[in-house]
Amino acid sequence: MKAYELFGFDNVVGRLFGLEVEAEGINLPRAPAGWDQVDDGSLRGVFPDSRSEYVTKGAVTKDEAIALLKSLYTEADNSQTIWDFSFRTSFHVHINILDLEEERVLNIIYAYRLLESALFTKCGAVRKNNRFCLRAADSDSFIDVSDMAFRRGLKEAAMFAHGEDMRYSSLNLASLRKHGTLELRCKDASSSVENMIDWVETIDKLVNWAVSFKNPLEMFHAVQEVRIPLPVAVLDIETQDKEYAKDISLSLQIPFLYSQYVEAQEVKRARLKAGLGDNQVRVRAILDDIEALPQIRIDDIRPVFNWQPVGGA
C-alpha cells in the first residue's frame, strides 16, 4: 500500500522537497518568488527585519530547491543582510513520501538510522545534543516509535509520533500524518548557500539509495555485502568507525522487527481469506501478542527484589 492511502492524502507524485530556513540577523531579505516569509516565535529579534522563517511555497524538485536557495541568498546579498545563524536557527527539509510504497518509506527511516552519525557530520556542532533535533542516541522515544514502524507498520507508529520528543526528533515522524512527509531537522542553517545546497543533495543521495531496495530486509542483506564503510559508499562521507558502530548497534533489531511485521501481515491475510471479519482478526492478533509474552512466575522474580511471603519463608 502506498503512503497516501495509509494516511488519507491525495497522491503527490515525485521526488519532491519542502524547505524551511530559520534565520536571525540584520536586514533580513524579503522573500523572493517561490518563498513565504513567516514569523517564528522561537527566534530572537523582530519580524521580519531581524527574525524570519522562509518556507517554500509547496513541494519542489531538487533542482527547483537549489534554484530557490540561490534566489534567497541573492536577495540577501542585495539587501546587505548580516546573517546570524544562532543555535536557535536551523534548516529543515521535508521529503515527499506519499507516492512511495510503505516498504520504501521504512527503507528511508532505516537508512537514516544506519547513517545518522554520518549525516550529523554535515550539521554543525550546535545541532548535536540539541533538544530541537534529538538523535536516536538522545531519545528513547524516537527509537521506540521508529522501531514500532517496522514492527506494527507506519500507520500505527505515526499515531504515537506526538509530543516534543517526537516532533523535535532529528527525523520527525510526526510529519507523516500532518504533511505526508518525513522531515529532517538536523541541519544547522548557514550563511553559505553552497553549504545549504550540499545538504539537499546529501538527502537526495540518502533517499535514492534507500528506495532502490524493495524492503528493509533487502537493504539489510545488501549492507552485509558492502566492503567499504557504509557512510562512504552511500553518502561519500568519512566518519569515525565508533560512530558508525553506534548507529549499527542502535539499529540491530530493525530487520527482525520487520520480519515479524511481514509474518503478521501474512497471517492477517490468511485469516481474512478464511472468512474472519476484520475485528476478529484484530482480537486474534491481540491474543497472539499476549500468548507471546514471556511467562513469569513469582518464584522467578522473588530473588531480584528479595520478596518474602507474609508469615515466613
Image (cartoon, grey):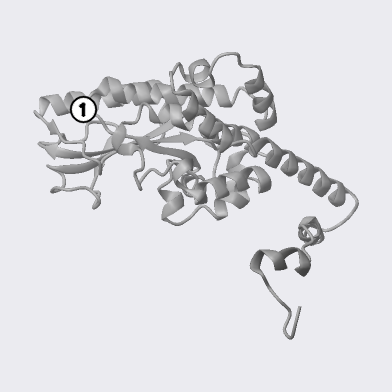
Tell me the element at label 1. Answer: loop
Closer to the camera, 234 or 153?
234
Residue drawn at the location 77% of the way across and 57% of the way down:
294
In the figure, 227 relative to 79: above or below?
above
Residue 311: % across, % down: 74, 86
Residue 312: % across, % down: 75, 82
Check disc 1 and report the residue beneath it: 191
Residue 122: % across, % down: 36, 26
Q: Is residue 49 left or right of residue 146?
A: left
Q: Quadrant of the N terminus?
A: top right
Q: How would you rate the neighbour count of disc 1 (Cα within 10 Å): few for under 14, some for 14-19, many for 20 or more?
A: some
Residue drawn at the location 76% of the way across and 58% of the way down:
293
Residue drawn at the location 58% of the way across and 42% of the way down:
4
Q: Residue furthest top?
A: 227
Question: Where is residue 28, by image quadrant?
Answer: top left
* Residue type of the residue flagged with mark 1: Ser
Closer to the camera, 252 or 202?
252
